[in-house]
Image (spheres, rainbow, N blue to C red):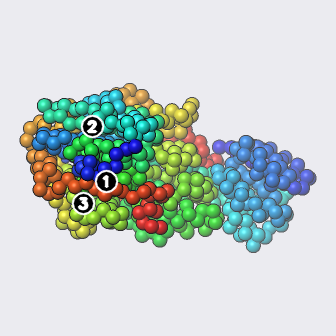
Amino acid sequence: MDFRVLLVENNSIILDQSVNAINKAPGFTLAAKYKDSAGALGQGKVFRPNLILLDIDLEENIQVIPKFVREYPHATILCLCTQWDAELTARVMRAGAAGCLVKPFSAPELVDAVKALESSGQNVTSEVITFFSPKGKSGQTTFVANMALRLAAKEQKNVAIIDANLQFGDMAIFFNLTPTTTIMEACRDVKNLSPVSLTSYFVPATAQVSVLCGTRRPEDAEKIIPKNFVELIGMVRSRFPYVLIDLSVGFSEFTVSAMEASDLTFLVASEDSVFENRHLKKALYVFEGWGDSLQDKLKLVYNRVQNTSNAYKQQLEESIGYPITAFLPNEYDLVSRAADEGRMASDIRPESKLSTAINQLLRDLHGKHQIRWEKS
Amino acid sequence: MEQENATAVSGAVLTVFSTASGCGKTMLSINLAAAIAKLGFSVCLLETDTQFGDIAYALGIDPKENLHTAQAAWERDPGGFFIEDYVARVEKKGTVFFTLTAPKDIEDAYQIQPAHVKHVVKALRRKFDYIVVDTQAAFDQMNLMCIDQSTLVLFLGIVDFLPTVKNMRIGMDTLTRIGCDRERIRCILNRSGARTRLPLSDVEGILGTSFQTHLPNDFKSVTKSFETNTPIVLSGNSSLSLEIQKLAKVFTGEDFGAQPKQEPKKEKKGFFARLFGK
Ligand SMILES: Nc1ncnc2c1ncn2[C@@H]1O[C@H](COP(=O)(O)OP(=O)(O)OP(=O)(O)O)[C@@H](O)[C@H]1O
Ligand SMILES: Nc1ncnc2c1ncn2[C@@H]1O[C@H](COP(=O)(O)OP(=O)(O)OP(=O)(O)O)[C@@H](O)[C@H]1O
Ligand SMILES: [Mg+2]
Ligand SMILES: [Mg+2]
């Protein structure tokens, strides 16, 4: 994917040099340029940048980094300074920036800086995926957990899981975790957090998968403000290349705003319910509001399927009126044993039909969905 | 204005509840309603699973009125609101009961307000001996209102895997915290005998209580009953059918008297905040 750069540079000469460098750098385009941060914060949004180069020789620009993080949750912020300073770098990173680049910079220097960020585990562009079902027991949590592991293994990148099944989150049990903080505290504190301090709310499940666990008690759900959750998603984005969100069932302000803040939504259905196709049709009617991009943004996955043949898939698609992106096979014994033991089906039996189906799904999505960082 | 004569509000409310979906709430509530009706009582099956309720599908009906239109009528004119005009008559194999289902359209579901539905429930209690409520698996405002109005809460569980059991435990604890006494809760195990890796004794240990009733696993009958729109209790005496009929007898017999309940307290902004005084 291309980087759409928003440049904020007070010095006119360096501004021109930077514009030149950006234009020369392959894969980079200038989205907008400003001499001060006020203009960039006000109008820059229209240009949908995903990389912000911010001159921090001006103290006031350092002050407004958190504002940039909030206004541009999808963008990476790279600070520009005349002289490298470790302390200053640490300070801007605490505020939410990804790092510093010394100016003036050349096109190769810009490319290298972004590459370096990426290889140091810093996130440059990220993909947020929400998982949604009209009704529960669709195997959604099983799907999210196994997909996180497969994704981390395949891409060799860090994956965040947010357990946003607000009342009865099961992710902690799935991974056998004992959280000290949950989604409730993270949403409560989000205004005072930086991307760095946010990480401490996550519990590592494996070397590459971290989980923000669900509430301890159902009544905590009520304390979670949808707007804060959307802000939280933006911040998590800046730390993890992949963010998978296990949502509560049904349409609510919370689930809808989370889906809208994500790049991709998996609509998870289960063959276990007699009326599932009717639920799906009803749900799809609501999703029609997403307009032309619907089929790019919403992928239907059918779980617990006995007959995984193509003919059956076509028959189901006709009846539902929507393409099925994947069938996940019925593997009850494996899945329930895994959850009881706090392990993952795809770890217990990587060659199982379920793991194979998830791997295939990831391969199919790769390339079609170009939000992720895939540059060589 | 609406009649607030406590003695007139006498119908018993049986709320079928669970902390995970797919536990069989719709299966049980339909069959319990049919079984109680078969015993000769007047019954209304109320559906509060507003967005994706299954009652109309399972009974093969397309009611003209629904919870949303009933609420709207009450809002327009509480004094002139007649609940009889909003319930749909269901006749299956000679047994008659009534139902008030969730609206067909999801837009209408958004309009439903638990504080107003409360008055619809009260109207139902003036009219029917029994109101069986099919709910959604959550502690939302609607369910808290229903639980508050309930004579009994039928807490339904299945033992598919550990997370479900954990959620049942959380459910029991939460019910206690919101002031639903143990005496008002009946724990019912559904899909008993289904394949599971968890011994029942361990499950009951985690729950801190045992299941008073075990409903046998009978996937074929349940599926067929949903597909043919015929309650299991009205089509033969399978063990699942018998077990539910037994429950109906217990609930209509000496197990409890259909006492009028106290007026629920006024609703404040946060429903949990109200209940927990925080
Ligand atoms: N592929 C599968 N094959 C067979 N059974 C499965 C499969 N995936 C999940 N299940 C089973 O379905 C049940 C629900 O799984 P899970 O908890 O993942 O679903 P969920 O949609 O997250 O449920 P909830 O609504 O309770 O959050 C469990 O008993 C699980 O073992
Ligand atoms: N006793 C039983 N034996 C076998 N299968 C059952 C039994 N009861 C329910 N089921 C199965 O479980 C599925 C869910 O049942 P039902 O729709 O009644 O649950 P629910 O609690 O109302 O679910 P939801 O929360 O999604 O509304 C049914 O499709 C049926 O196949
Ligand atoms: Mg789940
Ligand atoms: Mg139901």
Which label is found at residue B184?
Answer: 3
Tell me residue B71's x, y (percent): 40, 39
Q: Judge left or right: residue A141 versus residue B223.
A: right
Which residue corresponds to mark 1? B149
Q: Residue furthest bottom?
A: A87
Neighbours of disc 3 within 10 Å: few (<14), some (14-19), many (20+): some
Verify CB contact (< 8 Å) between mark 3 and mark 2: no
Residue occupying the far right of the picture:
A13
Q: Residues within 10 Å of mark 1 (few under 14, many from 20)?
A: many
**Amino acid on which the number 1 mark rests in the picture:** Gln
Q: Disc 2 beta carbon < 8 A from ligand 4? A: no
Judged from the image, the secondary structure of the residue bearing numbered disc 2 is strand
Q: Quadrant of residue B86?
A: top left
Chain letter behind tag 2: B
Q: Residue A279: tell me if it is visible.
A: no
**Nearer to the camera, B261 or A2:** B261
Evaluate whether label 1 is on the same chain as label 2: yes
- The chain carrying label 1 is B
Q: Name which of mark 1 and mark 2 comes first in the sequence.
A: 2
Compare residues B88 and B62 and report the one nearer the observer.
B88
Residue in the picture at 72% in, 56% down = A68
* Amino acid at the residue labelled 2: Thr
Do the dots labelled 3 and 1 sit on one chain? yes
Residue A154 left/right relative to B52: right
Name the residue carrying label 2.
Answer: B99
Q: Say if mark 3 contacts mark 1, CB within 8 Å.
A: no
**Alpha-carbon span between mark 3 and mark 1:** 11 Å
Label 3 marks a residue whose chain is B
